[in-house]
Amino acid sequence: MSESTPSDDLDELVGLVPRPSRPTPFVVAGVLVLALLAAWIAPPWLNPSFRPRGDAVLSLAQGAPFALSFTWAAAEQPPVTLVGVDGIKGAAVAGVWVVTGAEYAVWGDSWAAVADRPAPPRDAVAFVDALAAAGAPVAAGRVPAVVGPGDAIVVLWEITDCGAAPPGGISYDPDLSGIDLRLRNPLGATVRQVDSPLMNPLDHLDDWVDQPGNCPG
């Protein structure tokens, strides 16, 4: 009769324990494909976007390096929270608001009162304060704010480098604005809308850059 030693019994037990298997390259590739497919078919509400109505306005201050743009949302725009607008090379974002159609006239009048005066403020904070003093509701609608049908995204741009403007003046391409929006989806995550339909102020400087006092410096 044979007798087993403790070491023999331990070896047998170890042999019975299943060893973890490493994922094969095919399994890894399959997981990646499923992840990409899930991102592709994700419901639109997980990746919201700003839908333009098709018209926009951009005004340039005279004697100060500022521009104000209005871009209206389409009638079928689902409510979406705008978190912010990214600056671009040559232009910084000095303020972003969401305004209703009724507020547009107030903003327009306030802008004209400040931007067309003989010596408008050249500092961004002072310029916003001047807009408020002229009646613009700068304390309301600051982002983050919800954009709904017919609302407008208002961006105050500070031109920081006139040399960044495209040669030859206007070259606006609504599909390649270079302006990214940051939006919040219902899960609270921030998503980015690349090359949004907002107007790029550098594409509209044209002869403005040649007028004294407009460019920084």
Image (cartoon, grey):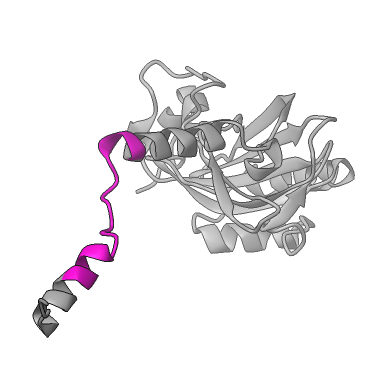
Q: The magenta stretch spans which residues? A: 12-27
The residue closer to the viewer here, 125 or 3, is 3
Q: Is residue 8 depicted above or below 61 in this figure?
A: below
Which residue is outermost to the front? 1
The residue closer to the viewer here, 101 or 133, is 101
Q: Residue at x 43, y 32 (%)?
A: 33
In the picture, residue 153 is in which quadrant? top right
Residue 11 falls left or right of residue 148: left
- Locate residue 140, reporting x and y percent: 77, 61
Residue 20 counted in the magenta span? yes
Q: Residue at x 55, y 63 (%)?
A: 125
In the picture, residue 163 is in which quadrant? top left
Residue 26 falls left or right of residue 176: left
Residue 152 appears in view: yes
Q: Residue at x 84, y 45 (%)?
A: 100
Residue 117 appears in view: no
- Locate residue 63, reporting x and y percent: 51, 43
Residue 86 falls left or right of residue 95: left
- Locate residue 105, reporting x and y percent: 84, 41
Q: Is residue 144 depicted above or below 108 in this figure?
A: below
Residue 153 falls left or right of residue 121: right
- Locate residue 183, reporting x and y percent: 62, 48
Quadrant of the image for the N terminus? bottom left
Which residue is outermost to the bottom? 6
How many discs mark residues in the rendered view? Answer: 0
Residue 203 counted in the magenta span? no
The residue closer to the viewer here, 136 or 116, is 136
